[in-house]
Image (cartoon, helix red, strand yellow):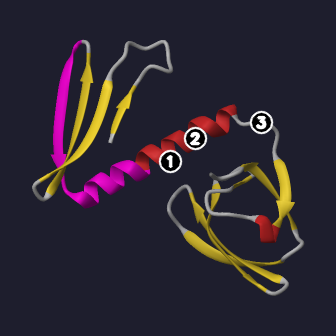
Amino acid sequence: MTSDNDDTAAQAGRLEATPVGEGVEIRVATPSGELSLICTPGRARELATALGLAADEVESVRSADPVTIRADELRRGDVRDGDRTMTVDSVRIDGATAHITWKSGAGRSWNQLYDADARITLRRRGR
């Protein structure tokens, strides 16, 4: 994976992630220098998760007005509106019941059952 940073006012840079032997090399290059890290696949996934959560936080600050949808329309990545971050981890519809697994910003998970037509207010829709 290669990514160029040209969508901000910051100086252009490159971010590359490539497999190297049994590890993953992450290379960051800017006009002022270059940094290369090699990590395990597990650590690379942790980094990807941390980057995703940070991106979610940035987007939540910029998000538009909350949207209200039916429980049976929830999808992975949807973020519930409220004081605490709650993200949909999984959805299973069983007839008139929506089984939703939520995940907190602290990494805790729990399941809740809703009537399929229950209205849920979201801060932002997942992708």
| Labelled disc at residue 97 | none
Q: Identify the amino acid type marked 2.
A: Glu
| Residue lying at 77% horizontally and 36% vertically, measured from the top left | 64
3D distance between C-alphas at marks 3 and 2: 13 Å
- Residue located beneath label 3 in the image: 64
Relative to 11, residue 97 above or below: below
Task: Give whichever of discs 1 and 3 has the lower sequence position.
Answer: 1
Residue 60 left/right relative to 17: right
Q: Cα distance, mark 1 to mark 3?
A: 18 Å
Bin the neighbour count of mark 2 within 10 Å (Cα to Cα): few under 14, some 14-19, many 20 and up.
some
Q: Identify the element where label 3 is drawn.
A: loop
Decide whether residue 21 is among the magenta residues: no
Residue 105 image position (x, y, % from top left): 55, 55
Q: Earlier in the sequence, mark 3 or mark 2?
A: 2
The answer to whether the residue labelled 2 contacts the one labelled 1, judged by CB atoms less than 8 Å apart, is: yes
Q: Nearer the viewer, mark 3 or mark 2?
A: 3
- In this orientation, which residue lies closer to the viewer: 8 or 61? 8
- Quarter occupied by residue 70: bottom right
- Region rendered in magenta: 32-49
Q: Is residue 36 left or right of residue 56?
A: left
Task: Give the labeled residue for mark 2.
Answer: 57
Q: Position of residue 19 (x, y in %)?
A: 19, 51
Residue 77, quarter of the rendered image:
bottom right
Left or right, 102 with respect to 28, comes to right
Q: Return the residue at label 1.
A: 53
